[in-house]
């Protein structure tokens, strides 16, 4: 586990895409089987997290939870916002620290596993951003990250107790009432090996918002040693609507034929908030 600070773009603008890669100290690509990226999450200290505003993650530095705006893992989730949309980054100092005249930072929390001997012990995570500076961003629309997590406001990890009947999936749910309405222009899931899918269901309207499926190397995941390759993701305008007050249910579905430890069930959406 590692937590640290990240230097963000030094100008205000819109982040239009995000992905992460692992590299060695010579900037060489580190393959996904050499070092297992369990997860990595990036937090913006300038903005407040929507679904867990009060988690004391930043100690005395902030009196709110910094905005969890991107996460990735072994499945290398990437986010590409539809044309004209982006996550706005404002590099002005945080109000209560304005007197220090220091630009705000991002934080990153990551968890890596070294898989085999002989691979680099020094590994870097590179965050690749698509970025449109404010000067070139006329007409762009800001999005609000929404972090759905079956173990929210905690360490996001849980265990699937097994083994049980392989026909019997293990489900873990979490309900959240939307404080604001709008439309999701991106949605994507994060599961670990053993995960089958993660569903976001609107209990108020009875409609499925989005299902992010786990993709394995083989049609039968058990034949590919449960080696998670990717998660399906949504990216489109005008997006998928939700209204303020809608109760959403997140369900992470895991295989139940064996024991899975320290897994996660997360979906991140980018909401264009209603005016
Ligand atoms: Cu994870």
Image (spheres, rainbow, N blue to C red):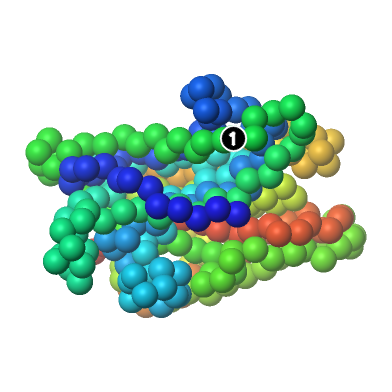
The image position of residue 196, as x and y in percent, is 69, 50
Q: Viewed as shown, does residue 96 lie left or right of 78?
A: left
Res 130 visible = yes
Residue drawn at x 52%, y 42% as measured from the top left: 77
Q: Nearer the viewer, residue 239 or 29?
A: 29
Q: Viewed as shown, does residue 14 lie left or right of 167?
A: left
Q: Nearer the viewer, residue 88 or 205?
A: 88
The answer to which image quadrant residue 76 occupies is top right
The image position of residue 197, as x and y in percent, is 64, 52
Q: How many marks?
A: 1
Q: In the displayed structure, would residue 21 be above or below residue 2? A: above
Which residue is label 1 attached to?
122
Res 270 visible = no
Residue drawn at x 32%, y 67% as measured from the top left: 48
Q: Nearer the viewer, residue 24 or 170?
A: 24
Q: Viewed as shown, does residue 107 lie left or right of 114?
A: left
Label 1 residue SS = loop
- Label 1: how many residues lie within 10 Å, few (<14), some (14-19) or many (20+)? few
Residue drawn at x 20%, y 71% as measured from the top left: 96
The image position of residue 56, as x and y in percent, is 44, 75
Q: Quarter of the image for the C terminus: give it.
A: bottom left
Q: Quarter of the image for the N terminus: give it.
A: bottom right
The image position of residue 175, as x and y in percent, is 53, 74
Residue drawn at x 51%, y 22% as measured from the top left: 26
């Amino acid at each position: 586990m590692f937590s640290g600070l990240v230097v963000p773009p030094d100008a205000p603008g819109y982040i239009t895409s995000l992905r992460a890669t692992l590299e060695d100290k010579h900037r060489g690509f580190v393959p996904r089987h050499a070092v297992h990226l369990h997860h990595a999450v990036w937090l913006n200290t300038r903005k407040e997290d929507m679904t867990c505003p009060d988690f004391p993650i930043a100690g005395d530095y902030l009196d709110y939870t910094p905005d969890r705006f991107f996460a990735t893992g072994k499945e290398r989730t990437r986010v590409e916002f539809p044309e004209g949309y982006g996550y706005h980054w404002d590099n002005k100092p945080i109000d209560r620290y304005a007197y220090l005249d220091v630009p705000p930072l991002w934080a990153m929390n990551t968890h890596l596993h070294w898989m085999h001997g002989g691979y680099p012990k020094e590994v870097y995570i590179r965050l690749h951003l698509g970025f449109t500076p404010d000067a070139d961003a006329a007409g762009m629309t800001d999005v609000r990250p929404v972090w759905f997590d079956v173990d929210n406001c905690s360490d996001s990890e849980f265990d699937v107790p097994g083994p049980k009947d392989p026909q019997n999936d293990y489900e873990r749910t979490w309900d959240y009432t939307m404080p604001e309405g709008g439309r999701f222009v991106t949605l994507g899931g994060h599961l670990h090996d053993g995960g089958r899918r993660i569903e976001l269901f609107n209990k108020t309207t009875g409609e499925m918002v989005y299902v992010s499926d786990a993709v394995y190397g083989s049609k039968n995941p058990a034949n590919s040693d449960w080696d998670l390759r990717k998660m399906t993701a949504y990216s489109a305008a005008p997006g998928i609507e939700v209204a303020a007050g809608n109760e959403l249910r997140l369900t992470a579905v895991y295989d139940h034929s064996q024991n899975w430890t320290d897994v996660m069930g997360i979906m991140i959406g980018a909401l264009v908030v209603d005016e």
